[in-house]
Image (tube, rainbow, N blue to C red):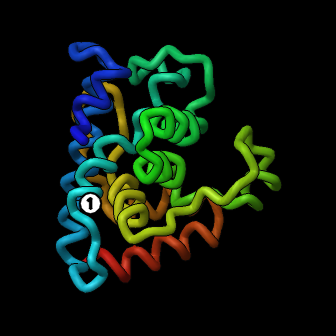
Amino acid sequence: MKPFDVIKEFYRPGTRSYATLVHHSEQVTQKALTVAGRVPHLEPDLDFIAEAAMLHDIGIRATTAESLGCHGKHPYLLHGTLGRKMLDDLDLPQHALVCERHVGVGISPSDIVTQNLPLPIRDMRPVSIEEQIICYADKFFSKNGNGNGREKSIKEVMAEIEAYGADKVKQFKTWLEMFAG
């Protein structure tokens, strides 16, 4: 499977949405592969990480994210579930799960119910080591729409995550212990 072939099925090269997706995904892929290199004892699948990290945000195209060049009809929060459907339809179920499970530090059924989120009620937290690595790496890069996203500091990432509750901070701190090296 070649990630760029999949991306080109949904995005037109030369568009803002394509440039935003590819730039962000390349940043996340590089960080995820670096992180995976720090934990060889966990036996992460590097080929899968390289593919799935490139595709983790493929669902943004169907969202209303004008600054990213995305003119869909869905709230941005749904980009993970939309991406899952897109990749499931291409018979890429493991890659599809990465799409769904990378949002925030993962979304629990309880989060969906208590926050009345417009998501199907199911567990959307990263499970596999590859999912966790990609989710962790993603937290360090924003898609700011101009292709110049810089890597955030751990302090900046923590400040963003704190807004979502102590359980999310605890999860991120667990990943820091596992991956920060």
Image-based side of 58 in relation to 75, left or right: left
Q: Quadrant of residue 72?
A: top right
Which residue is drawn at the image coordinates 40% and 55% (left, top)? 139
- Label 1 CA crowd tier, 10 Å (few <14, some 14–19, many 20+): many
Q: Quadrant of residue 70?
A: top left
Looking at the rendered image, the quarter that the C terminus falls into is: bottom left
Q: Quadrant of residue 120?
A: top right
Residue 16 image offset from top left, x and y in percent:
30, 18
Residue carrying label 1: 32
Image-based side of 103 in relation to 150, left or right: right
| Callout 1: SS | helix
Q: Amino acid at mark 1?
A: Ala
Which residue is drawn at the image coordinates 29% and 43% (left, top)? 54
Which residue is drawn at the image coordinates 23% and 47% (left, top)? 27
Looking at the rendered image, the quarter that the N terminus falls into is: top left
Query: In the displayed structure, would residue 26 be above or below residue 127?
Result: above
Residue 44 image offset from top left, x and y in percent:
28, 71
Query: 100 or 168, which lies in front?
Result: 100
Query: 25 or 88, which lies in front?
Result: 88
Which residue is drawn at the image coordinates 24% and 45% (left, top)? 150
